[in-house]
Amino acid sequence: MNYWLFKSEPDEISIDDLQQKDIEAWTGIRNYQARNFIRDKIKIGDQLFFYHSSCKVPAIVGSATVVSDSYIDPSAFDLNSAYVDPKSDPNKPRWYAVDIKFTQKFVKPLTLAKIKTDPKLSTMYLVEKGSRLSVQPVTTDEWQYISQLCQ
């Protein structure tokens, strides 16, 4: 099993939205490195932290489970989608998605400010300079430590 962090702006989809929907297609990823994680590395059963970004208090706010293999992202071909990609070809797709299932909303969200000041998280991908990926790996040690902090 692998561990991940998925970022979302809460006005796009929040942890509360995910809880209400239960399962959500994680579409609209338009970064090649994040796409490669989705297409090549993320598997059914992998766990992820759900992170609210671009908001007043960015934080890890909950967790979810990957419940599908990767598949061609339909939003790339949807002319009504903000994520349409006219250069993407259904026969040679550029973009992929996975489905995620709500696991839990954390009682104590872990803010980005706290992550940045915690020595045990100083090498976390999230805090690396220039790291802006919306899908990123989390180590087993980071997963276990953060899970304990958020209970």
Image (tube, rainbow, N blue to C red):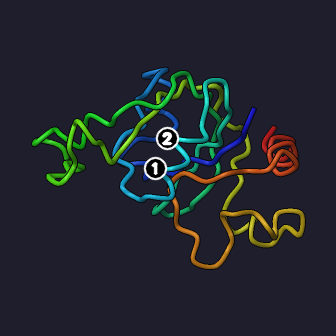
Residue 111, percent from left and from top: 68, 59
- Quarter occupied by the C terminus: top right
- Labels 1 & 2 near each other (Cβ < 8 A): yes
Residue placed furthest toward the left? 79
Residue placed furthest toward the front? 91
Amino acid type of disc 2? Arg
Q: Around disc 2, counting alpha carbons within 10 Å, would you say few (fewer than 14), some (14 to 19), or many (20 or more)?
A: many
Q: Quadrant of residue 66?
A: top right
Residue hosting label 2: 39
Residue at (86% x, 42% y) in the render: 144
Residue 47, percent from left and from top: 68, 33
Amino acid type of disc 1? Arg
Q: In which quarter of the image is residue 89?
A: top left
Nearest the eye: 117 or 93: 93
Residue hosting label 1: 35
Residue 25, percent from left and from top: 40, 30
Residue 99, percent from left and from top: 47, 27
Horizontal side of residue 74 vs 144, given as left or right: left
Residue at (65% x, 35% y) in the render: 63
Mark 2 falls on what kind of element? helix
Q: In this view, does 104 lie above or below 60?
A: above
